[in-house]
Amino acid sequence: MQDQLPSAARQRLAHDPHRPQYHFLPPANWMNDPNGLIHWQGEYHLFYQHNPERATWGPMHWGHAVSRDLVHWEDLPIALAPTPGGADADGCWSGCAVDHDGVPTLVYTGVHEGRQRPCLAVSDDGLRTWRKYPGNPVIAEPPAGLEVLGFRDHCVWREGANWYQVIGSGVRGMGGMILLYRSPDLVHWEYLGPACVGSEDEMGEMWECPDLFPLGDRHVLLISPIPLGKTLYCIGVYANHRFTPHMRGDLDPGGHLYAPQTMRDAQGRRLLWGWLWEGRTREAQLAAGWAGVMSLPRVLTPRADGRLGMAPAPELRALRESHRRWEDIVLTPSTANPLRAVDGDALEIEVEFEPGDAAQFGLQVRCAPEGQEETRIFYDVATHFLGVDRTRSSLDDAATRDLRGGVLALDPAAPLVLDVFLDHSVIEVYANGCFCLSSRIYPTRSDSRGVALFARGGRVAARRVDVWQMGAIW
Ligand code: DQQ
């Protein structure tokens, strides 16, 4: 059910122990993809796919929030709702925001009777309310001759006098692709051809939520391919209307981040947000009355080793409250837990490990006193696997229990620096500035609040451990 006031809805759900306190999520009900990210006159605007009626995916609206500091968010009225009989009668799906000669303009996918087509909306009151372009949709059909599996989600940018956009698409038997268009005015679009086509076996058949942007002297393409259920990043060269990938990777092998979008802010930073989906049943989501969380803002940077640099936005330090530090701890399998005094479900934990001869090391969070529940964030030295093990995170059968992660190769003497953000049911792990894992956990016990460090099969040193209690953003 939709509450009258966002603040009343937030209040009503505030005591849910799984509800994050410093990650953005809507007042209530369903959220998926971030949309329309834009830094406008000192304000960060975050729009999002939203079903304001229920905590399940449904008729898509664009929810809207604004922030001056990237940390605290204020709810604004819903920006877009389906128009009965219109090109978006069945949903306002994902898209982006651009500054069209001073006019804030949303480019989104209108869905009607199974057709997905680009639509526009503009604001003349500082992005508070939105007027749809009466001529929607602005592209009537997908390109002739292509049997596309989808034609949706928009990444729009300016080059000289023209606008360009790529639209997510794919053709069965060929693979996922982005279709490139050019326009002088955002209304009239000329099709230029596919800017990139992937191999279906490796990169799926339909690319959702493409984002193509310059980073350093390269371009990055983000895609969320069906049926992979995860986001890939490709680093390569964009020239002559073609993007050629030179390397690719999993953006976040934690298994919960999807359909991210980026924006360039006034400082010239490339910021990314992604949708962190739930790890529990539809019934559990409906009972909770909310579903879907936004990741923390991540700063993307080019790196000399060719990887994508990813770090939490430094503004998040404003959330740090009481702090404790430990230094030079040597851990062995029999060491008593040095962090036994730590208690919390909204924490930032930064640890610098110096690998010794331990086979595995890491930390545990949301630990119950007798170990009935715990979540392990671990590094396996032989396989270079950094993972989140939630096989014992929850006594609730409805919560996903698995082990997810990916390979982070470390030089033998190099430290592993983990920056872990724990926020009730959300875990975000940042490692060595180039690796992220997002996960969701649902411990059942009110005393599952402990934190521990561990080593298996040998010794490891924790050179520095910093733990902060984190404040709430509302
Ligand atoms: N979510 C939107 C689509 C997009 C998908 C619909 C990705 O536009 O392809 O809610 O999660």
Image: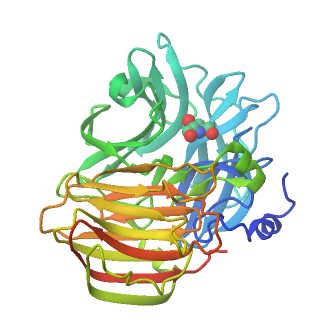
Looking at the rendering, the quadrant in which ligand 1 lies is top right
Q: Residue furthest top?
A: 145
**Relative to the observer, which residue lies in front, 457 or 215?**
457
Residue plotted at (79% across, 36% down):
83
Examine the rendering and report whether any part of residue 268 can be seen: no
Q: Decide if residue 365 is on the left or right side of residue 103.
A: left
Q: Residue furthest left?
A: 412
**Relative to the observer, which residue lies in front, 137 or 433?**
433
Residue 240 lies in quadrant: top left
Q: Decide if residue 66 is on the left or right side of residue 414.
A: right
Q: Residue furthest right?
A: 4
- The scheme the figure's colours follow is rainbow
The number of callouts visible is 0
Determine whether 107 is above or below 30 in the image.
Answer: above
Percent across and percent down for residue 268 are: 38, 63
Q: Locate the C terminus by quadrant.
A: bottom right
Percent across and percent down for residue 34 are: 57, 51
Examine the rendering and report whether any part of residue 47 can be seen: yes
Residue plotted at (60% across, 63% down):
443
Percent across and percent down for residue 269 are: 38, 63
**Relative to the observer, which residue lies in front, 366 or 143?**
366
Residue plotted at (63% across, 65% down):
66
Residue plotted at (37% across, 49% down):
251
Determine whether 85 is above or below 27 in the image.
Answer: above
Q: Decide if residue 13 is on the left or right side of residue 169.
A: right
Percent across and percent down for residue 418 are: 34, 69
Residue 193 lies in quadrant: top left
Residue 461 lies in quadrant: bottom left
